[in-house]
Amino acid sequence: MCEQGQIVIYIQPKYDVVHKKIVGGESLVRWLHPKFGMIPPFKFITVLEKNNYITRLDYYVWEKTCQLLRYLKDKNGSVLPISVNVSRVNFYTTNLVSNLLKLVEKYNLEPKDLQLEITETVYTEEKQVIYSIISELQEAGFKILMDDFGSGYSSLNMLKDAPIDVLKLDMAFMRNLDNENERNNIIVESIVELSKKLNISVVVEGVESEKQVNFLKSIGAEVIQGYYFSKPIPTDEYEKLIEE
Ligand code: C2E
Ligand code: CA
Ligand code: CA
C-alpha cells in the first residue's frame, strides 16, 4: 500500500481561538484505495495493531510528516510543530527513542518540530516501562501529548507523575457540553485550571461550534482542534492555510 502511494497523510490544524492563529497540526493517516476510495483509519488501524504491522505504518506516517516539516522549513524559514500518533505497540517491539531520533536527524529537524501523541490508555499499562521510555523521549527534546484524556481509565491522580507536556481533552467532553450536562462543564473547567497549575498545556479536541468555543474561552482554554476551525486536510491545503 505504502509503495503505491495509497497511504497519505492529512493534517488537521490546531488553532488558538484567543490569538486567532494556527499553532501547529496533527498528522492523520488516510488510505486512498483505488477501488473503494478513502478508507478512514478506524477501519484498518485495529487490524494492523493486532499483527504489529502498525509500527511500520506509524513509521511511514512519521517519515512523511518529517518530509513535510523539512519542506515547509526550507520554504518559510521556520515551521510550526506537527504531532504524530504513536501506537502502543511501538513501546514493546521497537527501539522507539533511537528510531525517532534518527528520523529527525535524517531530515535535519529538531525533536520539538515533531510532537508525539500517546493515548491515555498506554499510560495505564506497564507503567515503569512506558514512563521511562516517554521520559527519555522528553529528555531528547520531543514534546509529549497525552491523547484522548478522559476517555478511558485515566485518573487525575495520574497527572501527579506521568510525563506529559500537553493534555488533549477527549471529544466526548464537547459532546456532553452540547447535552447541557452541567457536571461535564465543571469537570472541563477544573481540568483546564488544574493543568495550568501543573504547567501542562491543553488542546481541546472535537470542537465543532461557536457555542463550544465561547465556553472554552470563558474558562481560559485557548487551543482547539476540530471541525469548527478545520477538518483534516491534504498537505498542500495545509501549506496554503499556514501561509495565509
Ligand atoms: P485521534 O488521534 O483522536 O484523532 C482525532 C480524530 O478526530 C480524527 O479522526 C479527526 O478527523 C477527528 N476529528 C477531528 N476534529 C473533529 C470534530 O470536530 N468532530 C468530529 N466528529 N471528529 C473530529 P481520524 O482521522 O478518522 O482518526 C481516527 C483515529 O485513528 C485517531 O484518533 C487515531 O487514534 C488513529 N490514527 C490516525 N492516524 C494514525 C496514525 O498515523 N497512527 C496511528 N497509530 N493511529 C492513527
Ligand atoms: Ca491523536
Ligand atoms: Ca484524540
Image (cartoon, rainbow, N blue to C red):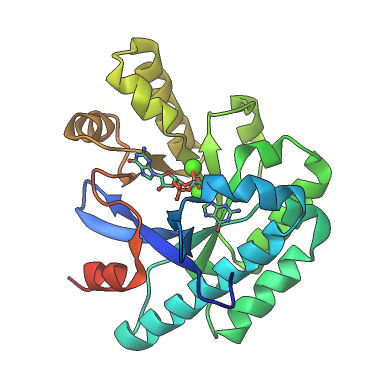
Quarter of the image with the N terminus is bottom right
Q: Nearer the viewer, residue 160 or 46?
A: 46
Q: Quadrant of residue 81?
A: bottom left
Rendered residue at 35%/25% (across/down) = 175
Q: Is residue 164 visible?
A: no
Rendered residue at 65%/45% (across/down) = 46
Query: Quick check: 182 above or below 201?
Result: above
Q: Is residue 234 left or right of residue 65?
A: left
Query: Quick check: 110 above or below 45?
Result: below
- Measuring from the top left, give residue 3's x and y in whole percent: 59, 78
Q: Is residue 204 visible?
A: yes
- Measuring from the top left, give residue 45's x and y in whole percent: 61, 50
Q: Is residue 94 left or right of residue 217?
A: right
- Measuring from the top left, give residue 73's x and y in whole percent: 39, 82
- Measuring from the top left, give residue 210's x and y in whole percent: 17, 35
Q: Quadrant of residue 184?
A: top left
Question: Which residue lies most toward the front here?
Answer: 35
Rendered residue at 64%/26% (across/down) = 153
Query: Quick check: 138 above or below 65?
Result: above
Quarter of the image with the C terminus is bottom left
Q: Nearer the viewer, residue 232 or 51?
A: 51
Q: Nearer the viewer, residue 124 or 128?
A: 124
Query: Quick check: 153 above or below 91?
Result: above
